[in-house]
Image (spheres, rainbow, N blue to C red):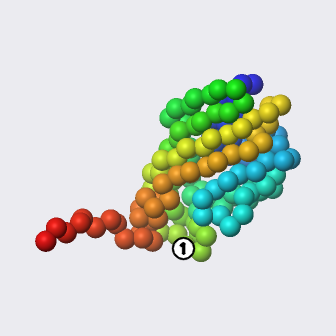
Amino acid sequence: MDIKEISRRLAEDPWQGKLEEVLELVGDDYVAHVPGSAEPFRGKEGFRAFVTTYQTGFPDGRITIDDQIAEGDVVATRWTGRGTHTGELMGLPPTGREITVAGITYSRIADGKVREAWVIWDTLAMMQQLGAVPETMPVRTT
């Protein structure tokens, strides 16, 4: 399996009920750097905890791969996440709102397993769509 396929499976498969299968593609030394997290997520259990947090908030969630670029042992994956907020998400009670969020994951893969990942998505847009943060207001010019 090539590195693009591994990255694609890590993004899409957990949302299709295949979290346990995809854990086989996560290295024991896995480290995920996620903005806003106090510490990186580590190992298979870190990956599981990260995914489960969002699956709890968005049980119908899904990820669509928009584009991938690979070179050497790294792959950049541009994706879109969609879902309905029907479960608690990090203390935010369900709103019933549907969201669409753009993101990018940059992964280093060795020996068929993801070893390190940097994940960035438009968290502000997600929180605005959930009503947790006010929409951006137009700038006044007086």
Q: Amino acid at mark 1?
A: Pro
In what element is the residue under mark 1?
Answer: loop
Residue at the extreme right of the image, as rendered: 28
Residue under the point 60% across and 59% down: 35
Quarter in which the N terminus is drawn: top right
User: Dividing the picture into quarters, in which one does residue 69 lie?
Assistant: top right
Q: Is residue 81 above or below residue 64?
A: below
Above or below residue 6? Residue 94 is below
The answer to whether residue 51 of the structure is visible from this angle is no
Residue 32 against residue 10 in the figure, above or below: below
Q: In the rendered view, would you say 78 is above or below 69?
A: below
In the rendered structure, the answer to whether residue 17 lies left or right of residue 67 reads right
Choose top left, top right, bottom left or bottom right for residue 139. Answer: bottom left
Instruction: Point out residue 112 in the picture as x, y percentages from the top left corner.
Output: 80, 31
Q: Give the residue drawn at x 64%, y 56%.
A: 34
Does residue 139 appear in this view? yes
Counting from the top left corner in percent of width and height, residue 82 is at 50, 49
Residue at horizontal 53 percent and vertical 39 percent from the top: 78
**Residue at (65, 26) in percent of width and height:** 71
Within 10 Å of the Cα at label 1, are there few (<14), some (14-19), or many (20+) other Cα atoms?
Answer: few
The extreme left residue here reads 142
Residue 70 screen position, x and y as percent? 62, 28
Residue 118 in the image: state x and y as whole percent: 64, 48
Residue at the far front: name it.
142
The residue under label 1 is: 93
Question: In this figure, what is the number of numbered marks?
Answer: 1
The C terminus, quarter of image: bottom left
